[in-house]
Image (cartoon, coloured by chain):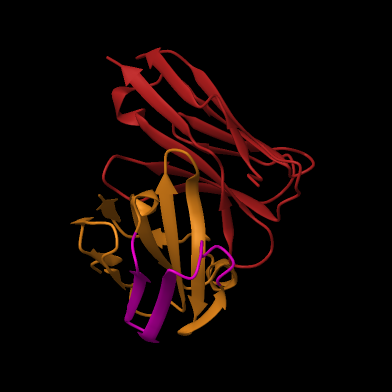
Amino acid sequence: TQLLEQSPQFLSIQEGENLTVYCNSSSVFSSLQWYRQEPGEGPVLLVTVVTGGEVKKLKRLTFQFGDARKDSSLHITAAQPGDTGLYLCAGVLGNEKLTFGTGTRLTIIP
Amino acid sequence: DAGVIQSPRHEVTEMGQEVTLRCKPISGHDYLFWYRQTMMRGLELLIYFNNNVPIDDSGMPEDRFSAKMPNASFSTLKIQPSEPRDSAVYFCASSPGLRANRLAGREETQYFGPGTRLLVL
């Protein structure tokens, strides 16, 4: 059973455009993380959100945790080719285990 | 720090053969995780250890899979016998522990190795 569904599964946009990807679940998480994975490498943490309604910014990336701590979104402003990669959300249920989402594969076209 | 080290980086084997994947976690990390990533199923947790002791192996697909951590600096994931459906990228990750990171004011992250790409023919 996949606890975390991400949408869209694939996204291909032009450089300079804005985009939003979503991570949804029916479960409540104590915190939620976003990772980016590049080809041939393991996932690398971008951010952790802990409080319902929390918004965190990382340069052109804005992360939001839903009020009920069941969902999250990642918004990228003025996308650049370096943003290309697989974006994974991961929910923390209170122990050390991470439950990863299905992933959004993002391609930014120069 | 060299980060999490995995070997081999690539493995091609024939169905029925034994496969052993190796992982050296970051020194001082108490937790070690084995994941499998495929296009169909995404990134799945197979098993994790705390202080060399297996804590949760509910993600291990079947008895053909086994994992050991004989000491704090080494772990293996073994598949015997291997099958074509085992083809995937296998990641090892280590962490000081989410709670330890939180108390120390660090990001609560697991640190992933580069993965082993396994192809079973």
Using the image, determine if residue A51 lies above or below residue A21. Answer: below
Is B94 on the left or on the right of A101, as rendered? left
Using the image, determine if residue A107 lies above or below residue B62. Answer: above
Q: Is residue B66 magenta?
A: yes
Q: Which of the 4 quarters of the picture holds residue A63? A: top right
At horizontal 65% and vertical 47% (from top left) the residue drawn is A1
> Given the current orientation, which residue lies at the most extreme bottom position?
B71
Q: How many marks?
A: 0
The magenta segment is: B57-82
Q: Which chain is orange?
A: B
**Which tint was used for chain A?**
red
At horizontal 40% and vertical 80% (from top left) the residue drawn is B68
Whether residue A49 is visible to the viewer of this picture, yes or no, is no
Using the image, determine if residue B14 lies above or below residue B34. Answer: above
The x, y position of residue B8, in whole percent, is 20, 63
The x, y position of residue B29, in whole percent, is 42, 76
The x, y position of residue B60, in whole percent, is 51, 65
Is A52 on the left or on the right of A96, as rendered? right
> Given the current orientation, which residue lies at the most extreme front position?
B16
Whether residue A82 is visible to the viewer of this picture, yes or no, is yes
Q: Is residue B77 magenta?
A: yes
Is B39 on the left or on the right of A26, as rendered? left
Is B17 on the left or on the right of B91, as rendered? left
